[in-house]
C-alpha cells in the first residue's frame, strides 16, 4: 500500500486545484460578440406590419421540435437554452387566439420584452390538431415570425415540463437599440 501511495503522490505533484467556475451569464458576453442584424424599416405600425407570413420556412408537425439560431451562438448558450436553464422572465400563451390576433399579440409581447431588457421568454403556441386539419397553424406561424424578428437570437422547443413541442423558449438580444 505504501508503494501505491508514493506513486499517487508523485503523479499528483503538479496538479493544482481548478479555479471556481464562475457561471458567466449571457449579459457578460462582449457586446460586439453578435453581429448587428440589419433592421427592417419599421413604419408606425411597427414590426407587425413588416413580417411576412411565408418566408420559405418548412412546415412542421405538432410533435416536431423547433430550433433556430440567427447567428452562431456559443454551444453552451444553445445547450442552456435547450435544457431550459435560462430564467424565463416572461411567458405568453397563444391558445384560443386566431392567427391574426396571435400575430399582433406576439409582436406586442416581444416589443415589451425587448423594451424591458428581458433575455429569455417562453411562447406557448400549442401543437395543433384542435380543428379538422392536423397542421399546427400557430406553431408554424410562430416558427416563421420569430425568424424574422431582429432581436431574436435563437429559439427552441421547450422541455416537456414547460410545454414540450407546444412551446418555445426564445433568447432575445436584450438591450438591442430600436432606433
Image (cartoon, grey):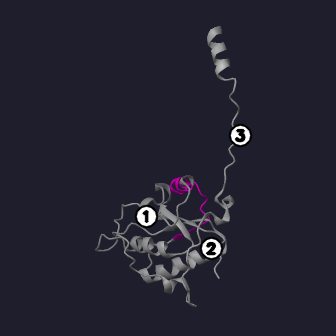
Q: Marks 1 and 2, Cα distance to the nearest angstrom? A: 23 Å
Residue 43 lies, in percent from the top left, at 56, 90
Q: Marks 1 and 3, Cα distance to the nearest angstrom? A: 40 Å
123 sits left or right of 34 in the view: left
Residue 56 lies, in percent from the top left, at 37, 75
Q: Nearer the viewer, mark 1 or mark 2?
A: 2
Residue 98 visible at all: no
Q: Secondary structure at mark 3?
A: loop
Read off the magenta span. Answer: 77-92
Tell me, yes or no, whether the highlighted magenta stretch contains residue 111.
no
Residue 3 lies, in percent from the top left, at 63, 9
Q: Marks 3 and 2, Cα distance to the nearest angstrom? A: 35 Å
- Closer to the chain start, of discs 1 and 2, is 2
> Residue at the location (36% across, 69% down)?
128
Specify the quadrant of the image occupied by residue 34. bottom right
Residue located beneath label 1 in the image = 166
Residues at marks 3 and 2 touching, judged by CB atoms closer than 8 Å = no
Q: Nearer the viewer, mark 3 or mark 2?
A: 3
Quadrant of image for the C terminus:
bottom right
Residue 72 lies, in percent from the top left, at 52, 61
Quadrant of image for the N terminus:
top right
Q: Secondary structure at mark 2?
A: helix
Residue located beneath label 2 in the image = 114
> Residue at the location (44% across, 83% down)?
100
- Please rate how many residues cluster around mark 3, counting C-alpha atoms within 10 Å: few if below 14, some from 14 to 19, many from 20: few
Residue located beneath label 3 in the image = 19
- Closer to the chain start, of discs 3 and 2, is 3
Amino acid at each position: 500500500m505504501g508503494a501505491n501511495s508514493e506513486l499517487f503522490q508523485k503523479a499528483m505533484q503538479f496538479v493544482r486545484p481548478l479555479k471556481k467556475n464562475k457561471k458567466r451569464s449571457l449579459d457578460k458576453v462582449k457586446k460586439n460578440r453578435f453581429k448587428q442584424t440589419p433592421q427592417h424599416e419599421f413604419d408606425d405600425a411597427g414590426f407587425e406590419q413588416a413580417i411576412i407570413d411565408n418566408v420559405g420556412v418548412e412546415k412542421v408537425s405538432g410533435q416536431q421540435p423547433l430550433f433556430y439560431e440567427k447567428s452562431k451562438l456559443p454551444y453552451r448558450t444553445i445547450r442552456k437554452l435547450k435544457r431550459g436553464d435560462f430564467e424565463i422572465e416572461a411567458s405568453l400563451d397563444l391558445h384560443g387566439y386566431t392567427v391574426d390576433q396571435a400575430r399582433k399579440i406576439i409582436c406586442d409581447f416581444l416589443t415589451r420584452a425587448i423594451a424591458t431588457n428581458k433575455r429569455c421568454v417562453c411562447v406557448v403556441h400549442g401543437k395543433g390538431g384542435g380543428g379538422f386539419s392536423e397542421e399546427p397553424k400557430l406553431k408554424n406561424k410562430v416558427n416563421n415570425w420569430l425568424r424574422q424578428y431582429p432581436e431574436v437570437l435563437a429559439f427552441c422547443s421547450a422541455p416537456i415540463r414547460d410545454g414540450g413541442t407546444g412551446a418555445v423558449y426564445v433568447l432575445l438580444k436584450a438591450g438591442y437599440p430600436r432606433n
